[in-house]
Image (cartoon, rainbow, N blue to C red):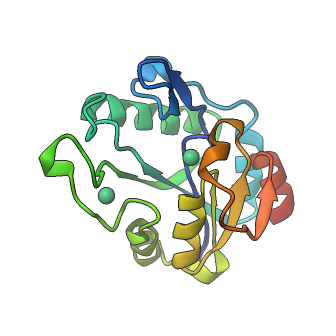
């Protein structure tokens, strides 16, 4: 069986964006707002060379909330994967949840199982890519990432991204890192 690292995206691979209209640090709503975090390719390549399959698992409710278009969100995701690929990082699969329980758009207003801390995408990855979840890790910057990973039977690493400190602190991770460099040093 394979072992995987499930990477949250925003705050792990790319920066959050401060949108003054909402007064919050949020996921980029368009490619023009996307900034990849510096220095992430080397640790990700170390992890893949050590045998870890890399996945992205991300909640992207901005379209459901009426803030941007689905097409813009899909372009951001493609740009993240493309940017990593150009540096030699292979993402085995990327899973995005576009739902939100309080979405403005009624067809996206659902309590789904794919929105973290829901575990649908980790279970799907395990089934489709022969992953041993108990040998795998979820790495994210929020308690919802840690709760997702733990509920799926993975170990969980907290990446202490500075702009999301208000969305964590309740769940104690198995590993605490400042960035992906520290994660790779711990897992390679
Ligand atoms: Mg995040
Ligand atoms: Zn969902």
Please name the residue shown 62% across and 82% down the image: 134
Asked where in the image residue 146 lies, by quadrant, the reply is: bottom right
Q: Is residue 188 visible?
A: no
Apparent side of residue 168 relative to residue 33 in the rendered image (left or right)? right
Q: Is residue 15 above or below residue 8?
A: above
Q: Is residue 59 above or below residue 72?
A: below
Q: Residue furthest left?
A: 107
Q: Quadrant of the C terminus?
A: bottom right
Apparent side of residue 185 relative to residue 67 in the rendered image (left or right)? right
Q: Position of residue 88 (x, y in %)?
A: 64, 41
Q: Is residue 43 visible?
A: yes
Tally of marks: 0
Q: Position of residue 85 (x, y in %)?
A: 56, 38
Q: Quadrant of the N terminus?
A: bottom right
Q: Is residue 167 above or below residue 139?
A: above
Give the quadrant of ligand 2. Answer: bottom left
Who is closer to the viewer here, 117 or 81? 117
Who is closer to the viewer here, 148 or 38? 148
Please name the residue shown 72% across and 30% down the image: 38
Q: Position of residue 92 (x, y in %)?
A: 50, 57
Who is closer to the viewer here, 35 or 117? 117
Q: Position of residue 156 (x, y in %)?
A: 67, 68
Q: Is residue 22 above or below residue 11?
A: above
Please name the residue shown 41% across and 68% down the image: 118
Apparent side of residue 159 relative to residue 7 in the rendered image (left or right)? right
Please name the residue shown 75% across and 71% down the image: 174
């Amino acid at each position: 069986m394979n072992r995987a690292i499930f990477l949250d995206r925003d705050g792990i691979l790319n920066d959050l964006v401060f949108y003054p209209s909402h007064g919050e640090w949020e996921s980029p709503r368009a490619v023009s707002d996307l900034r990849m975090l510096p220095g992430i390719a080397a640790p990700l390549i170390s992890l893949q060379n050590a045998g870890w399959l890399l996945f992205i698992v991300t909640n992207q409710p901005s379209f459901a909330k009426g803030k941007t278009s689905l097409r813009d969100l899909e372009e951001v995701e493609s740009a993240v994967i493309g940017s990593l690929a150009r540096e030699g990082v292979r993402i085995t699969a990327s899973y995005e949840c576009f739902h939100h329980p309080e979405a403005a758009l009624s067809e996206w207003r659902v309590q789904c199982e794919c929105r973290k801390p829901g575990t649908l995408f980790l279970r799907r990855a395990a089934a489709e890519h022969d992953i041993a979840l108990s040998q795998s890790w979820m790495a994210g910057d929020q308690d919802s990432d840690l709760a997702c990973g733990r509920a799926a039977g993975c170990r969980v690493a907290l990446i202490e991204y500075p702009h999301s400190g208000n969305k964590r602190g309740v769940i104690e991770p198995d590993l605490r890192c400042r960035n992906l460099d520290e994660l790779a040093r711990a897992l390679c």
